[in-house]
Each structure stands twice: as C-alpha cells, then as structure tokens.
C-alpha cells in the first residue's frame, strides 16, 4: 500500500527498517517515520481486542474499570472465592462448611447454572457475596464487544433473580481479559476481580491436610484466593481440606472477608496513611 495509507507491506517495512539501521550504523542522520501496521484479523473497534466501539458513542456509564488481583494491606485479611457454580455436586457442602466455620466468601456464579439451580443458593448467601462468571463459562476474550455485553447482561439478570443480590464483580473465565471484556464491564459497572493465589489440588492427590498446609503457608495479607465449588474429582482435595485451611489461617491471625470488604478495608487503610 502507498505511504499515505494505514498499512505498509511487509517488504516495505523491512526495506525501510534496513535503510534506517544502515544509516545509524554509518553515523548518518535518519528521519524516523511513524508506521501503522494493523493486524487484518482484528477489527479496529468493537472486536475482542478493542476496548472501544470505534467511532461510535461509548455507552460506558462512568467509564471507570478497576482490575484487581489482590489488595495492598498490612492487615491479615484474606478473601476466599469460589468459581463455576452453583451445581448440586459440591455447592451445598461448601456452603455448609462455610456456615459451620462462619466464613464469608465470594461466589462467582455462572448465569445458566444459577438459573437452573437457583434453589441451591436462594436464601443461603447471607454474609456472602456474588459475582458474575459469564453466562455459560465461555471465553469472553474471544467475543466482540456486543456479544460479551449480551453474555454478561444475561448472566447478571439470572444471578440477580436466583440469589436476590445484584453482582458488582466480574471474574472472566480462566482470567482471560480482552478489550471487549473491559468495555462490557464498564457498561455494567463491574469491578474486574482476578486472584493472587489458587488452590493447587493436582500437587496433593488424596492429601487434603497437606494441601491445606501449603495454602496456609502461601497466603499473604490481601490475598484473593481462588477455589472452585464445581469440577472433577481432584478438586475435592481442596474442599475436604477447607476446615484445616480455615483453622490454619485463623491460627496465623487471618480474618476471612468478602472481596468487596477486602478492597474497602485496604482503601481505608491507604487513605489513613
């Protein structure tokens, strides 16, 4: 394409780079020209990578999205989170364990499962917090802006109806982020929550106590801990070890909080400095 266009051919880019480098090697002055080399596979606006809708009006409310992995705090606080539910397989037993030990947690629910299994969570989320984990655990980072928004809006409504609580947090499946996810999050007023520590069940087969000991040793103040209340058999190691993990962290002086409470308390500590 001609120099005035938005794309140069690979040959042109290589030739100009060689001329520029050659001039620098000879000590000659060289004029540096800015180049735009767009990837033809990615739309300029509205696609999976784009956090805007191109030249269209950006309907994103306040236009502010925060992405968090953990919290900066010196207080011994930890936020326990569960992904992928609810399903009859393990969700009720997880809720029973948390209730027994008086531990609040944040549940990132899949919308389709929340709608189908609303009875599992209705009336049982007092003291807990819910977040959006997509409609059917699809990869939001591969969706365009409109599709990602529609997916999350559908899940948002299903979770709200099932639990009686409006989600204000989003955890994208697998932690995959794309521009379209950011755009949809801004439209829905979500805070994006990832994690700073994850259960490692595969390293401790048939050893829930050992797994709990490992997690207790790895937690630091402000940790957001990822667990699952849905999955294959190996994940039962973490769930069977929950009482030991809870006891071990409390013995170290840790307090369990929801994600939003963790972030609120960390912000208050920062403001007081």
Image (cartoon, rainbow, N blue to C red):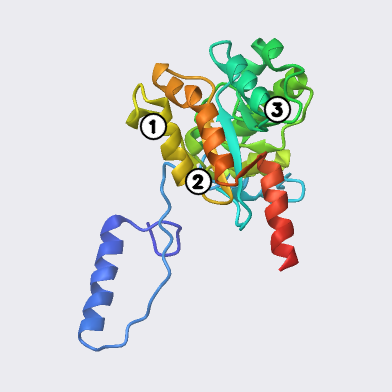
Residue position for label 3: 156
- Foreground mark, 1 or 3? 1
Mark 2 or mark 1, which has the lower sequence index?
1
Please tell me which residue is depicted at 74% across the width and 21% down the height of the picture. Answer: 163
Give SS at disc 3.
helix
Q: Position of residue 171 (x, y in %)?
A: 58, 36
Residue that carries the numbered disc 2 in the rendered image: 219
Left or right, 50 with respect to 210, comes to right
Closer to the eye: label 3 or 2: 2
- In the rendered view, tell whether residue 24 sits above or below residue 127: below
Q: Secondary structure at mark 1?
A: helix
Tell whether label 2 touches label 3 (CB within 8 Å).
no
Of the image marks 3 and 2, the number of the one nearer the N terminus: 3
Nearer the N terminus, badge 1 or badge 3?
A: 3
Residue 265: where, in percent of width, then height? 71, 52
Instruction: Estimate the spatial distance between the alpha carbons at disc 3 and disc 2, rounded to whole Å.
Output: 30 Å
Residue at the disc numbered 1: 210
The residue located at (55%, 15%) in the rendering is 90
Q: Residues within 10 Å of mark 2 (few under 14, many from 20)?
A: many
Q: CA distance from mark 1 to mark 3?
A: 37 Å
123 versus 216 height, above or below: above
Is residue 269 shown left or right of residue 35?
right
Secondary element at image label 2: loop
Considering the image in quadrants, where does the C terminus appear? bottom right
Q: CA distance from mark 2 to mark 1?
A: 15 Å
Neighbor class of circle 3 (other Cα within 10 Å; few <14, some 14-19, many 20+) is many
**Which one is in front in this view, the residue at disc 2 or the one at disc 1?**
1
Q: Residue at x 35, y 29 (%)?
A: 204
Residue 99, x across and y down, in percent: 68, 23
């Amino acid at each position: 394409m001609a120099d005035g266009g938005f794309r140069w051919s690979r040959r042109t880019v290589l030739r100009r780079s060689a001329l520029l480098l050659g001039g620098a090697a000879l000590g000659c002055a060289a004029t540096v020209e800015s180049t735009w080399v767009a990837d033809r596979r990615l739309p300029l606006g509205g696609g999976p990578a784009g956090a805007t809708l191109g030249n269209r009006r950006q309907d994103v409310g306040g236009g502010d999205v925060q992405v968090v992995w953990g919290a900066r705090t010196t207080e011994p606080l930890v936020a326990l989170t569960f992904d992928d539910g609810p399903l009859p397989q393990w969700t009720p037993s997880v809720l029973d364990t948390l209730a027994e030990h008086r531990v609040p947690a944040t549940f990132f629910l899949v919308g389709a499962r929340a709608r189908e299994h609303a009875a599992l969570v209705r009336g049982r989320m007092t003291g807990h917090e819910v977040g959006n984990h997509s409609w059917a655990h699809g990869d939001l980072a591969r969706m365009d802006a409109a599709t990602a928004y529609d997916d999350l809006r559908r899940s948002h409504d299903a979770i709200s109806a099932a639990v009686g609580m409006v989600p204000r947090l989003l955890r994208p499946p697998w932690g995959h982020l794309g521009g379209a996810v950011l755009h949809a999050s801004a439209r829905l007023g979500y805070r994006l929550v990832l994690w700073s520590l994850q259960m490692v069940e595969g390293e401790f087969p048939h050893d829930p106590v050992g797994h709990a000991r490992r997690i207790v040793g790895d937690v630091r103040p402000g940790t957001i801990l990822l667990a699952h209340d849905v999955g294959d058999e190996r994940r039962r190691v973490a769930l069977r070890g929950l009482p030991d993990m809870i006891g071990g962290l409390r013995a170290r002086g840790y307090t369990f909080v929801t994600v939003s409470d963790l972030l609120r308390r960390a912000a208050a500590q920062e403001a007081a400095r």
